[in-house]
Amino acid sequence: MTGDSLSAPQARRIALAAQGFVDKRPVSVPTMTHLKRVLGRTRLIQMDSVNVVVRAHYLPMFARLGPYDRRLLARAAWQPIGKRRFLAEYWAHEAALIPVDDWPLFGWRMDEFAGGRWKYTREVMARNTRLADDVVAVIDELGPSMPRTIESALGIVRGRGKTGSWWERGEVKHVCEALFAAGRLSAVRDENFSRFYDRSERVVGPGVAGERIARDDAQRLLVARAAAALGVGTVTDIADYYRMTRTDTQRALDEAVDEGTITQVSVDGWDAPAYLAAGVRTPRSVTMSAILSPFDPLVFFRPRALRLFDFHYRIEIYTPAHKRVHGYYVHPYLLGDDIVARVDLKADRAASVLRVPAAHLEPGRPGAVVAERLAADLTTMAHWLGLDAVRVGPAGDLAARLSRAVGRRPPSRPVR
């Protein structure tokens, strides 16, 4: 770094360090302490229900820690640890797991979502204020509940409630969603990822649920967290991290710059000013390799992935098969300080195989080196998922080399 200017490679290394990709992986079995260390870096984990490989919120930990017991994350989020949980689910960056201690920082958003996040949900709430109270009353009595359990308790059958109100069967779900967005309810999940709604006081604790932080103060803290998690970023990068408006983010950044906790810098090749968090590391090199979730915080804001890594990335799940370029559920592959390849992955649990329907090398990257490292990481991932083998399909310019590299990997017993 020269003065207030960064080179593009420096910005990449700062971003990777901020996201935990230069922290040493555990030499033994990762523990809750390691998981908390990662959350101290990323501050959130985006959730997604797609289970083609493994649900997306489990992958950021794997990318940074290597093989770990996924029950650690489940316990942190959805089962009590002592008298309280470590993580809670809320609309942070889309649906996300956040530290329980950060819950009060979203009070202003809960106020904005007081009637629900979505237009139809708000319409349901507007005509069903009595139903909302009845839903909460059922949860108070029964504890964590799914919408269908609440419907049954309310006697809602074919659109008619036992009280005589003409409620539609699906409206309980919308009411639960609205109360969740407003922070009145929180949620826990079971092993099938089914959501059970519960009083926020019982999930995050009455003290946390009742804490109020002024909107501007909360947003200043969220901007500080986003800047630290990114290391260096533009105002749009930082705003996207917690899905704040550009105006609110810029105001908080200007205050942080005045206070000296964030520095405005320029980055070679970036067409907008950047903001550097205080105390960031600028490692000389990055040696870690990692298979990334499509929703990993390192890449979930696609314009930033393009700016940092020259990596144009679009998820193609909803693209018709004949129009897909790289595959159905494609994962970026990080090697050192570069994203060097992308692989379409599918866990074939019936055959106990991690399938790679397509593998593509990024332009100009060393194919032989990438294939060997990726083969090792895919084998590790397969075993972490309890699968016996990796099978590479024919699609993509990396597929043949990757298939040969996988074939040279020694067999290893999967984790069951």
Image (tube, grey):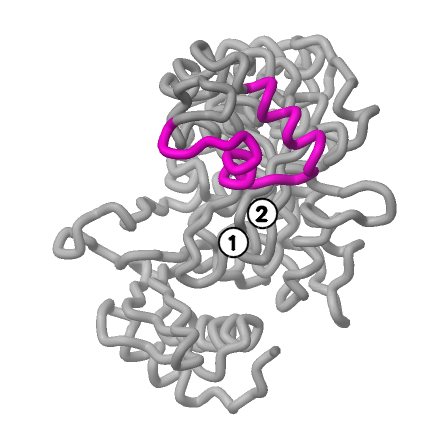
The 10 Å Cα crowd at callout 1, few under 14, some 14 to 19, many 20 or more, is many
Q: Quadrant of the C terminus?
A: bottom right
Q: Main secondary structure of the magenta part?
A: helix
In the visual, does 406 lie left or right of 266?
A: left
Q: Position of residue 163 (x, y in %)?
A: 51, 20
Write the residue at 70% across / 27% down: 103
Q: Earlier in the sequence, mark 1 or mark 2?
A: 2
Q: Position of residue 13 (x, y in %)?
A: 57, 46
In what element is the residue under mark 2? helix
> Disc 1, disc 2: CB below 8 Å?
yes
Q: Position of residue 403 (x, y in %)?
A: 34, 81
**Placement of 317 over or under 144, stated as above or below:** below
Q: Which residue is mark 1?
A: 337
In the visual, does 220 lie left or right of 173?
A: right
Q: Which residues are magenta?
A: 132-159
Magenta span contains residue 31: no
Depth check, front residue: 399 or 99: 99
Kind of residue sitting beneath label 1: Asp
Q: Position of residue 191 (x, y in %)?
A: 59, 57
In the visual, does 310 lie left or right of 65?
A: left
Q: Which residue is mark 2?
A: 16
Q: CA distance from mark 1 to mark 2?
A: 7 Å
Q: Quadrant of the N terminus?
A: top right
In what element is the residue under mark 1? loop
Magenta span contains residue 143: yes
Write the residue at 48% across / 87% down: 409
Kind of residue sitting beneath label 2: Leu
